[in-house]
């Protein structure tokens, strides 16, 4: 939660239980998490997302400048057209992620609340002589989540529509095509409203028959959609390939930007060192792991092969989790996840295959290409 925003007024609603971690400051649920999730899945719920951060960029150079320093092609971004971008380190690690939409005058960046101030500060340091102005607007604007698959229309508030899991222009994929991807069933957008209007905007949707839902529901839907999130799946070593994030957040054919060398090398010659997977957890013992819990191979001498990043109870799938594993971890073995009070078994639903080859990876060019990547993953030594 951004310090400027504070806790949501909707936490005063009857039955509200506050979220934790990256979802602190808004409701985890309002007393009926399963019912709220069913309403969300049936496109009949509104969700308080006012804990998210909002950064604005104005000025005539805004799109060309953002294009030059981030992973996304923004040169010809049309008004009210949503996309997303990553800010990478020089070594290609994910530092920031943001949903992007431009209204013709201002580019709006929606990110984790805890990252908004840092993102705004980094952008301000990078502007040099460019005609741009950057503002952390988190204290002024709040996001309202809707299960709607549509861009904001003329006359509506600024709206970011989640492009996941489509392979957007210039993107590529490690997982299945969009029409076979479980994320296709998840419609999601964020409507940005003045923070003082948050309660009235939610009330208007409730008056239209929608139910107020919490982040228990949104996180369950996100995990089931294999959708990576900055506040959960990303750590200091993450590169976008590991999370299948080249689908929507990286343009492979654009010019130079910080971290591009790693993006291109791993895509063209190597393999991501780790891979995202979804785990179906054994719920018979009523144990759930916490984010950060170790994932191990079975047996007394089981070795740690990764960590859980997100955990959810889905109204149909039961307990599920996202985890980032070593690429070498077998895809077809049942794993064990550590929990307080014991451990639970987990079966994998592969998101990024262990072979680590994207759908449009260029054909190998023989010994020269192989010699460039003797370790077999194409990643700098500092990433391994």
Image (tube, rainbow, N blue to C red):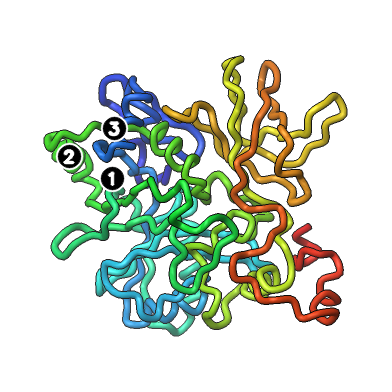
Question: Horizontally, is 314 left or right of 38 in the view?
Answer: right
Determine if residue 183 is in view.
Answer: yes
Q: Residue 175 at what x, y percent from top left?
A: 57, 55
Which of the marked residues, 1 or 3, is nearer the chain's N terminus? 3
> Element type at marker 3?
helix
Q: Distance from label 1 to label 3 (Cα)? A: 11 Å
User: Which disc, if any, is residue 33?
Assistant: none
Q: Residues within 10 Å of mark 2 (few under 14, many from 20)?
A: some
Q: Residues within 10 Å of mark 3 (few under 14, many from 20)?
A: some
The residue lying at 33 percent from left, 57 percent from top is: 161
Task: Kindly check if marks 2 and 1 are in contact, taking CB atoms under 8 A apart as contact.
Answer: yes
> In this rendering, which labeled residue sits more in front, label 3 or label 2?
3
Quadrant in which the N terminus appears: top left
Q: Residue 129 at what x, y percent from top left?
A: 45, 84
Which of the marked residues, 3 or 2, is nearer the chain's N terminus? 3
> Element type at marker 1?
strand
Q: How many marks?
A: 3
Q: Residue 108 at what x, y percent from top left?
A: 34, 64
Q: Distance from label 2 to label 1 (Cα)? A: 10 Å
Q: Distance from label 3 to label 2 (Cα)? A: 13 Å
Question: Horizontally, is 247 left or right of 383 in the view?
Answer: left
Determine if residue 140 is in view.
Answer: no
Query: Can you say whether 221 is above or below 29 in the image?
Result: below
Residue 361: quarter of image: bottom right
Residue 50: quarter of image: top left
Provide the residue designation for mark 3. 39
Quadrant in which the C terminus appears: bottom right
Q: Residue 2 at what x, y percent from top left?
A: 42, 46
User: Which disc, if any, is residue 205?
Assistant: 2
User: Which disc, if any, is residue 146?
Assistant: 1
């Amino acid at each position: 939660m951004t310090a400027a925003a504070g806790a949501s007024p909707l936490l005063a609603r009857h039955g509200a239980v506050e979220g934790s971690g990256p979802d602190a400051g808004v409701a985890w649920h309002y007393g009926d998490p399963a019912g709220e999730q069913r309403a969300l899945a049936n496109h009949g719920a509104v969700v308080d997302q006012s804990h998210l951060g909002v950064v604005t960029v104005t000025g005539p150079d805004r799109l060309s400048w953002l294009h030059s320093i981030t992973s996304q092609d923004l040169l010809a971004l049309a008004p009210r057209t949503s996309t997303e971008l990553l800010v990478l380190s020089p070594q290609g690690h994910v530092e920031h992620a943001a949903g992007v939409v431009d209204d013709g005058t201002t580019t709006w960046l929606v990110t984790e609340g805890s990252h908004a101030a840092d993102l705004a500060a980094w952008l301000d340091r990078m502007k040099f002589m460019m005609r741009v102005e950057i503002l952390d607007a988190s204290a002024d604007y709040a996001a309202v989540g809707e299960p709607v698959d549509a861009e904001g229309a003329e006359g509506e508030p600024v709206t970011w529509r989640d492009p996941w899991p489509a392979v957007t222009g210039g993107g590529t994929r490690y997982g299945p095509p969009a029409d076979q991807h479980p994320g296709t069933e998840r419609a999601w957008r964020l409507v940005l409203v003045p923070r003082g209007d948050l309660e009235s905007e939610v009330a208007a949707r409730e008056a239209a028959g929608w139910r107020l839902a919490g982040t228990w529901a949104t996180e369950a839907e996100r995990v089931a959609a294999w959708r990576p999130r900055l506040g959960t799946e990303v750590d200091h070593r993450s590169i976008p390939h590991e999370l299948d994030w080249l689908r929507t957040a990286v343009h492979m054919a654009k010019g130079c930007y910080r971290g591009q060398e790693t993006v291109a090398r791993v895509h063209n010659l190597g393999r991501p060192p780790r891979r995202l997977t979804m785990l179906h957890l054994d719920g018979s013992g009523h144990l759930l792991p916490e984010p950060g819990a170790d994932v191990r191979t079975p047996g007394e001498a089981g070795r740690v092969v990764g960590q859980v990043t997100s955990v959810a109870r889905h109204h149909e799938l039961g307990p599920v989790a996202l985890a980032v594993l070593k690429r070498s971890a077998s895809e077809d073995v049942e794993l064990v996840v550590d929990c307080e009070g014991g451990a639970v078994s987990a079966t994998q639903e592969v998101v990024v295959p262990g072979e680590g080859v994207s759908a449009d990876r260029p054909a190998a060019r023989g010994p020269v290409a192989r010699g460039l990547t003797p370790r077999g993953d194409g990643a700098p030594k500092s990433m391994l």
